Image: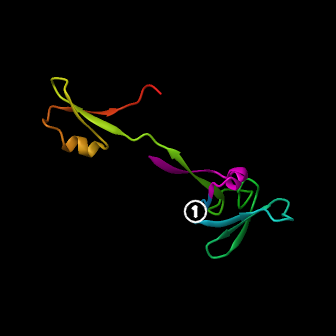
């Protein structure tokens, strides 16, 4: 299972294919460093409307503070799925469920205890 998260902008990762977005969630269409970049704002981003914005090498729109127009990277990471099991009074177990709600709904008796399975060895 994959989970998407936002991380601080890194130009090298962006060049390698990581997707850039603005901090406010808007999409970035193009990221470039012009042939003759501005000294303090060498990165140019272009949004869906074709509007160009300049950024520091760290992706900041404004060096003096955080802005919704700062660049971030969207990266995917593998996430272990959560699994649950019902354990009954006689220590018998039932099926393994992919979510807590289903495990609770599928208890055979009310006295069963539902546990989240945790991976302890790699």
Give x and y (percent) for residue 80: 43, 39
* Residue 95 versus residue 75 in the image, above or below: above
Question: Would residue 76 be found to the left or right of residue 14 on screen?
Answer: left
Q: Position of residue 29 (x, y in %)?
A: 64, 67
Q: Residue at x 47, y 28 (%)?
A: 122
Q: Nearer the viewer, residue 40 or 116?
A: 116
Q: Which residue is situated farthest in the top direction here?
A: 90
The residue shown at (16%, 25%) is: 89
Residue in view at x 68 percent, y 66 percent: 30
Please name whichever residue, 103 or 70, is drawn nearer the observer in this view of the structure: 103
The residue at which mark 1 appears reads as 24
Q: Is residue 7 magenta?
A: yes
Helix, strand or loop at label 1? It is loop
Estimate the x, y position of residue 74 in percent, counting from the top left: 58, 54
**Rendered view: 90 above or below 104:** above
- Color theme of the render: rainbow
- Side of 60 relative to 98 (left or right): right
What residue range appears in magenta?
A: 1-19
Residue 64 in percent (x, y) is at 73, 57
Using residue 119 as the reference point, say whether residue 18 is left or right of it.
right
60 up-or-down from 110: above or below? below
At 30% across and 37% down in the image, what residue appears?
Answer: 84
Q: How many marks?
A: 1
Q: Give yes or no for residue 18 being in the magenta stretch.
A: yes
Few, some or many residues within 10 Å of mark 1 (<14, 14–19, 20+) = few
Q: With 39 as the anchor, is 84 left or right in this view?
A: left
Q: Residue furthest bottom?
A: 49
Considering every residue shown, the one lying at the far left of the view is 109
Vertical placement of 98 versus 36: above or below?
Answer: above
């Amino acid at each position: 299972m994959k989970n998407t998260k936002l991380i601080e902008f890194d130009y090298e990762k962006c060049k390698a294919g990581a997707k850039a977005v603005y901090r406010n969630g808007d999409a970035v269409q193009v990221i470039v460093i012009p042939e003759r970049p501005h000294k303090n704002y060498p990165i140019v981003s272009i949004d869906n409307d074709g509007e160009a914005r300049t950024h520091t090498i760290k992706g900041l729109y404004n060096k003096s503070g955080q802005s919704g127009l700062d660049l971030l990277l969207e990266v995917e990471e593998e996430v272990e799925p959560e699994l649950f099991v019902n354990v009954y009074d006689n220590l018998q177990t039932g099926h393994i469920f992919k979510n807590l709600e289903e495990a609770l709904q599928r208890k055979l008796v009310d006295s069963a205890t539902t546990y989240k399975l945790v991976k302890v060895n790699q």
